[in-house]
């Protein structure tokens, strides 16, 4: 046997090859999970925003629905990348990764993204006149409208639900604490976080579309929704933490704990911005919706909130795979 062949077959070379494969697989998994988590929570929050909060022009409805479809596409693409990571880590083929237990959650998100795109691709979905103040619309004299889901939209709603449920089957929800209780608490956590995140993005999108016109009525309507979502996020997050850690030393002595503290800090900063909106901006806008200074502050605040919540999503991805020991 030649020297070249002997060197090529050393255990060290095999180890290095395995390490590179593992690193690539983990990177793909994390990138894919970020895309799908971002997409699922954004689609969920935007749909709630459209149904519960938004009253505006038909053009705004169309743009918000396009954003939901884009979120579905992000979910679909992220799940595909995640499955590529599963295949790389397990040395599996694509067909094996689709049926393997380790790829079940990503497979659910793949289907979820597809359903969202198929169910909400029709951007001319019906919108009914609400008879509310025209100043909340686009100012063209048509008045405000409210989005009414078409029958095909049911696929989108099912897709979002499937995407949220997929998080029952990966991360520490599977490995730590009482399985069923942890899954239910995780459902509340993801849903509330999505309502908060997607609602903020929806507000940002409408603020851009209105080009300086007031978003005060929407902010007033969204404020109690965001407050309720924040409370649920905090309570569910605290319960999940208690189910995951063995002791409070885990919060500073493990990778998972340190990432959690970063996430809590980011959520806290976001909550402070939201509190400023709720207690300072909203009362002024409630009394004087045309107040330009407060309207500008509100737009800046929601952009900051959206950026912070996107960071929270990124940290959450690393939390799912972080070591607790």
Image (tube, grey):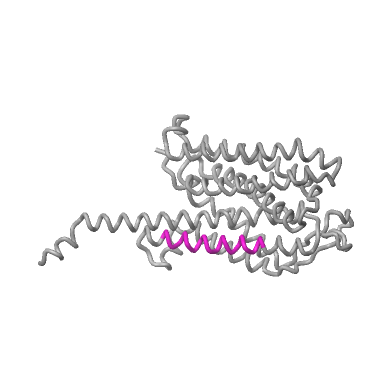
Closest to the observer: 45 or 151?
Answer: 45
Horizontal relation, residue 140 to residue 28: left or right: right
Q: Residue at x 46, y 53 (%)?
A: 30
Horizontal relation, residue 151 to residue 159: left or right: right
Q: Residue at x 84, y 42 (%)?
A: 286
Extreme residue toward the top, this view: 248
| Image coordinates for residue 70, horizontal then vertical, percent | 62, 63
Magenta residues? 67-86
| Image coordinates for residue 43, horizontal then vertical, percent | 64, 57
Q: Residue at x 61, y 65 (%)?
A: 115
| Vertical placement of residue 174 versus 1, above or below | above
Q: Is residue 15 one of those drawn in magenta?
A: no
Quadrant where the image shows the C terminus: top left
The part of the image, by quadrant, that contains residue 11 is: bottom left
Horizontal relation, residue 307 to residue 262: left or right: right
Q: Residue at x 45, y 40 (%)?
A: 256
Closest to the observer: 21 or 83?
Answer: 21
The part of the image, by quadrant, that contains residue 273 is: top right
Extreme residue toward the left, this view: 1
| Image coordinates for residue 54, horizontal then vertical, percent | 77, 54
**Number of numbered discs on residues:** 0
Secondary structure mostly seen in magenta is helix
| Image coordinates for residue 122, horizontal then vertical, percent | 70, 70
Closest to the observer: 300 or 43?
Answer: 300
| Vertical placement of residue 218 versus 83, above or below | above
Quadrant where the image shows the N terminus: bottom left
Q: Is residue 73 one of those drawn in magenta?
A: yes
């Amino acid at each position: 046997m030649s020297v070249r062949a002997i060197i090529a077959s050393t255990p060290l070379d095999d180890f290095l090859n395995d390490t590179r494969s593992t690193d690539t697989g983990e990177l793909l998994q994390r990138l894919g999970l970020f895309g799908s988590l971002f997409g699922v929570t954004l689609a969920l929050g935007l749909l709630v925003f459209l149904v519960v909060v938004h009253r505006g022009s038909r053009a705004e409805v169309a743009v918000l629905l396009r954003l939901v479809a884009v979120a579905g596409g992000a979910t679909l693409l992220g799940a595909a990348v995640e499955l590529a990571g599963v295949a790389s880590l397990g040395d599996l083929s694509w067909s094996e990764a689709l049926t393997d237990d380790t790829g079940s959650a990503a497979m659910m998100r793949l289907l979820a993204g597809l359903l969202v795109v198929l169910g909400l691709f029709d951007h001319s979905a019906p919108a009914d006149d609400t008879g509310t103040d025209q100043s909340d619309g686009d100012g063209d004299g048509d008045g405000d409208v409210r989005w009414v889901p078409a029958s095909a939209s049911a696929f989108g709603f099912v897709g979002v639900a499937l995407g949220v449920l997929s998080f029952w089957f990966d991360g520490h929800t599977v490995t730590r604490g009482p399985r069923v209780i942890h899954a239910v608490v995780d459902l509340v956590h993801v849903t509330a976080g999505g309502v908060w995140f997607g609602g903020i993005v929806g507000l940002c999108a409408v603020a851009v579309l209105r080009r300086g016109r007031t978003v005060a009525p929407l902010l007033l309507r969204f404020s109690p929704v965001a407050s309720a979502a924040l409370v649920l996020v905090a309570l569910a997050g605290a319960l999940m933490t208690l189910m995951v850690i063995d002791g409070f030393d885990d919060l500073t002595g493990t990778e998972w704990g340190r990432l959690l503290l970063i996430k809590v800090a980011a959520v806290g900063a976001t909550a402070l911005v939201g509190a400023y909106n709720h207690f300072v901006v909203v009362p002024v806008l409630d009394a004087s919706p045309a107040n330009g200074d407060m309207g500008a502050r509100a737009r800046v605040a929601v952009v900051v909130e959206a950026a912070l919540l996107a960071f929270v999503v990124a940290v959450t991805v690393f939390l799912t795979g972080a070591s607790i020991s």
